[in-house]
Amino acid sequence: MDGRRMRIGEVADRTGLSLRTIRHYEEVGVALPTARTRGGFRLYTDEDVARLLVVKRMKPLGFTLEEMRDLLDVLDRLQDPGTGEPARDDLVKRLAVYRSLVEERCAKIRARLSDAEQFSAELTARLREHRDRPGAGRAEGRELSR
């Protein structure tokens, strides 16, 4: 880390999260800013941004706030050189469980996306079918262009 600290607006730009969401994650203890200015403005480091990105990626996969906290704790403790070997082995096992959960949830999302894409293709085919009829599409085109 270069020691550079960012205000919340820059963090929002870098993460794609809203200011409100970032503040919410602070309030619930998932991602805290490293420091504050004398005026009370939140200051974030690159590590804080990385934590917010982990949370951002977990959210659409349906992880709870408690699971987010737990995974962040696992990741923090694995980075800590003071974590002993028995604890590290347990942490690696917990990390593997989270990875498996992510893979399962991604597979479900891929299946849902495949269904949605197939549905879109079916609607496109029906639209073509009706537009390709003689005399079809003229009224629809005017309606859609309004």
Image: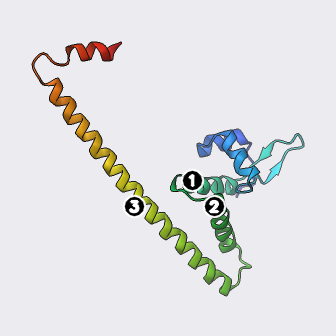
Report crowding for label 1: few under 14, some 14 to 19, many 20 or more residues within 10 A (C-alpha).
few
Nearer the observer, 108 or 92? 108
Q: Left or right of 41: which side holds 123?
A: left
Disc 2 marks which residue?
Answer: 68
Query: Would residue 59 be seen by someone viewing this image from the given angle?
Result: yes
Could you tell which of marks 2 and 1 lies nearer the N-terminus?
1
- Vertical placement of residue 136 versus 78, above or below: above
Label 1 secondary element: helix
- Vertical placement of residue 42 versus 107, above or below: above
Query: Would residue 4 be seen by someone viewing this image from the given angle?
Result: no
Q: Mark 2 and mark 1: span between their CA atoms?
A: 8 Å
Could you tell which of marks 1 and 3 lies nearer the N-terminus?
1
Q: Position of residue 33 (x, y in %)?
A: 76, 52
Specify the quadrant that holds the N terminus.
Answer: bottom right
Residue that extends furthest to the left in the rendered view of this protein: 134
Q: Are marks 2 and 1 in contact (CB under 8 Å)?
A: yes
